[in-house]
Image (cartoon, rainbow, N blue to C red):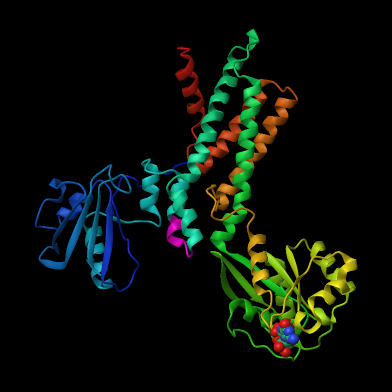
Amino acid sequence: MAVQLTGWEDTIVALATAPGVGAIAVIRLSGAESFEIINSLFPSKDIAAQTSHTLHVGLLKDGDIVLDEVVISLFKSPKSYTGEDTVEISCHGSPFIQQQIIDACIRKGARLAKPGEFTQRAFLNGKMDLTQAEAVADVIASQNFAAKETALKQLRGGFSGDLSRLRDKLVEFAALIELELDFSQEDVEFADRKQFNLLIAELKKQTDALIESFRLGNAIKNGVSVAIIGKPNAGKSTLLNALLNEDRAIVSDIAGTTRDTIEETLNINGIIFRIIDTAGIREHTTDTIEKIGVGKSLSKMRSADVVIGLFDAADTTPEELRQQQLQFERDKLKYLLVANKIDRIGESSFREKISGIGVQVICISAKEKQHIDVLKETLFRNAISGDILSEGTIVTNARHHAALREVQRSLNDIQLGMTNNLPGDLIALDIRRCLHYLGEITGQVEIDRDILGTIFGKFCIGK
Ligand SMILES: Nc1nc2c(ncn2[C@@H]2O[C@H](COP(=O)(O)OP(=O)(O)OP(=O)(O)O)[C@@H](O)[C@H]2O)c(=O)[nH]1
Ligand SMILES: [Mg+2]
C-alpha cells in the first residue's frame, strides 16, 4: 500500500472532543511546530523547555486578547500518540472559545487536520500498524460490549500479532526458496519441503479461522438484520413486540394491518439484531398501498442476513410449508421457519402434522410469549459460528477479510504447486503474492527488502 507523505511535515490542529457545548473541550496540535505555536499563544512559560508529560495552567492569549484560561498537556516526540511533538489544550467547552483557539493556532502556522490524520501520522511514524490504526476508529464507533472488546483487542495488536507471526515464518521460506534459484545450476534444496508443507498447512488453518471469524466480526460490528416475513395475520407484528418485549407495532386481526416496514434493534448476548417487521405478503391484492408494502417486504427479505418465515401453525398445510422452504432455498436465503400460534393447536399435534416432510421448524406463540427465548437463542447461534467470548482473534474489517481471501487463494496455489512439483520460481511467485496480501493488511509491504534482508542476515552471502 502506497504511503502518502504529502503535507506530512506540517503541524495540524483539530478539536479532539465532540463539537458543541461541554464542560471542557480538548484541542490537539501535532507536528514539528506545535511548541512554537503554543509558545506564541501562551505567555506564562516556555512550553518547549518543560518536561514531557506535564500539565501547565495559564492564559491563552492572541496578542492582548485573552482567549481562555486553559490547561496545556505536553507530549514530546516520540512519546506521543502521533510520535510527533504534541500539545493538548483543555479549554472551557464553549464552541465559540474552541473556534477562537483553533483559528489562533491556524494563524500561527498550523493547518486544520484531515479526518483521521493524527492516527495516520501515528501509523506513518511506526507507533502502530494499519490494523491497529483501523481499530482506533472501531473503538470510537463501538456501540456495544462485544464491539468494544474486539476493537480494543485489535488496537492492542491481537490481530496483527497473529498475522506478523504467520508472515515472518513465510518470509523465511521465501528467502530459502529464492536462494535456491540463485544456485539453480547446482540442484540444491535449502528449503526443507516437508517443513514447508507443514508451514503452509498451518498458515492455511489460521487463515481459514480468521476468515471464518469475519462472520462473527461483521455481526458484532454491524449487527444482523432479521426480516420477519409471512402471510397477513401470521403474527409478525405480535412477534416483533414479543421479541422487543414492548408494544411497538400495531397488532390486529385485520389482514394487512402492517403497511410499511418497522425496524427495531434488539441486543441478544451482546450482538445487535435489527428486527424488521414487514407487511404481510399475499399475491392477489388490488390495494395500491398494500402492493407497495408487499414490494418493500420482498426487498427487505432479499437484503436481510436472516429471514424468519413466520406462519400460522393452525392453518398452514405441510405442502405450503415445503413450498415456502423450497422458495427460500431457491432464493439462497438464510432462513428460520417459525410456526406461530402454537397455543391454538398444540406443539405435538402440529409436529405430527408436518412429520412427513422433514422440515425443521421452531414452534412459538408470539401472543402468549412461548418459546421466544428458543427463537432468540437460535438467532444468536445462527449469527455466529464461534464463541463470542473465546480468546481467538476476530476479524471485523472488510478490507482485512478481502485480503485474507487473497492470502487463502495464494496458499492454495502454493499447495497445488508443491503437489505438482512446480519449479521454485513459480512457487516463489505465489509466496510473494501471499506475503503481499498479508503485508497489505498490516501495512508492511516492502516484501523484497524483507526477503533480501533475511537472505543476507541468515546466510551472509556477502556480495
Ligand atoms: N392465538 C394466537 N393469536 C396470535 C398469536 N400471534 C398473533 N396472534 C393474533 O393474530 C392476529 C394478527 O396478528 P398480527 O401480529 O397483527 O399479524 P401480522 O402478521 O403482523 O399481520 P399483518 O400486519 O396484517 O401482515 C392478531 O389478532 C393477533 O392477536 C399467537 O401466538 N397466538
Ligand atoms: Mg403486522
- Does the stretch in magenta take in 381? no
Q: Main secondary structure of the magenta part?
A: helix
In the rendered picture of this protein, how many numbered marks are placed on residues? 0
Q: Nearer the viewer, residue 51 or 148?
A: 148
Q: In this view, does 154 lie above or below 325?
A: above
Q: Nearer the viewer, residue 34 or 363?
A: 363
Quadrant containing ligand 1: bottom right
Residue 219: x and y, percent? Answer: 59, 60
**Residue situated furthest front in the rendering:** 348
Residue 357: x and y, percent? Answer: 89, 66
Instruction: Please state the extent of the stretch shown in magenta in the rendering.
Output: 137-144
Quadrant hosting residue 116: bottom left
Quadrant hosting residue 419: top right
Q: Is residue 323 at least partly visible in the picture?
A: no
Residue 96: x and y, percent? Answer: 25, 72
**Residue situated furthest top in the rendering:** 186
- Does the stretch in magenta take in 142? yes
What residue lies at 63% left-to-right and 12% top-to-bottom?
Answer: 184
Q: Is residue 137 at least partly visible in the picture?
A: yes
Q: Is residue 442 left or right of residue 174?
A: left
What residue lies at 58% left-to-right and 14% top-to-bottom?
Answer: 182
Q: Is residue 13 left or right of residue 416?
A: left
Residue 33: x and y, percent? Answer: 23, 48
What residue lies at 72% left-to-right and 79% top-to-bottom?
Answer: 365
Q: In this view, does 22 lie to the left or right of 307?
A: left
What residue lies at 78% left-to-right and 77% top-to-bottom?
Answer: 311
Q: In this view, does 402 lie above or below 427?
A: below
